Image (cartoon, helix red, strand yellow):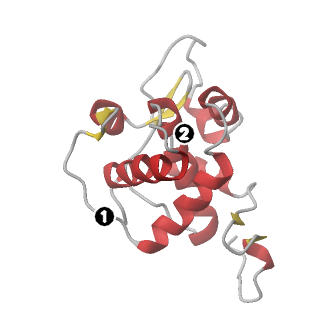
Amino acid sequence: MEKIINVAQYIFNEYKRVTGEIIDEMKLQKLLYFSQRETIAILNEPLFNEMFEGWKYGPVSREVRTSYTTDGINYETEDIKSESKYIINNVIQEYGALASWKLSALTHKEISWLNSRKGLKKEENGRIKIQTEDIREDAKKVRPYDYVWDMYYDEFDDYEAVV
């Protein structure tokens, strides 16, 4: 299991390597969420244990929020496993070119975010935790794509669907 802060630093570095640009915090937060969802969809387990909160613009990790800088994560981080990198790299390929506001809009369709917003006004950030079981529900509706092999995971001969 990874730590969210290490995953955030990896996304920060990989996004910069791929695009030549510094990722803004909103995009980083959304790519973290999608990395969590895709890992659950593929491996049937979370990428990290830390939880998001359902803020008005989508899922937010307070730990990442307080340590993000335009130079990277202002926290001592460690490398993550190659299996995690593989999934995250596919997430960056899938969603990285989208504008931060578009990613925010996508997260607003997620069951997990909608459930965390119950009882809140539209303009309120809120502090309600997004439940991993709700992300698991969101993961059921995705069809993960592998950009290295240029095919969906369920097209691999030895792929076993996780239900």
Quarter occupied by the C terminus: bottom right
Which percent across, then down, holds residue 145?
A: 72, 64
Disc 1 target residue: 79
| Residue positioned 68% across, 29% down in the render | 105
Along the line of sight, the residue nearer the viewer: 69 or 153: 69
Q: Amino acid at mark 2?
A: Lys
Quarter occupied by the N terminus: bottom left
Residue 100: quarter of image: top right
129 to 134, vertically: above or below = above
Disc 2 target residue: 30
| Residue positioned 19% across, 50% down in the render | 76
Residue 99: quarter of image: top right
| Number of marks present in the image shown | 2
Which percent across, then down, holds residue 140?
A: 71, 58
Which percent across, then down, holds residue 56?
A: 55, 21
| Residue positioned 41% across, 44% down in the render | 51
| Residue positioned 75% across, 70% down in the render | 150
Residue ranking furthest to the left: 76
Along the line of sight, the residue nearer the viewer: 101 or 130: 101
Q: Amino acid at mark 1?
A: Asp
Along the line of sight, the residue nearer the viewer: 76 or 49: 76
Residue ranking furthest to the right: 155
In this rendering, the label closer to the viewer, 2 or 1: 1
Residue ranking furthest to the front: 20
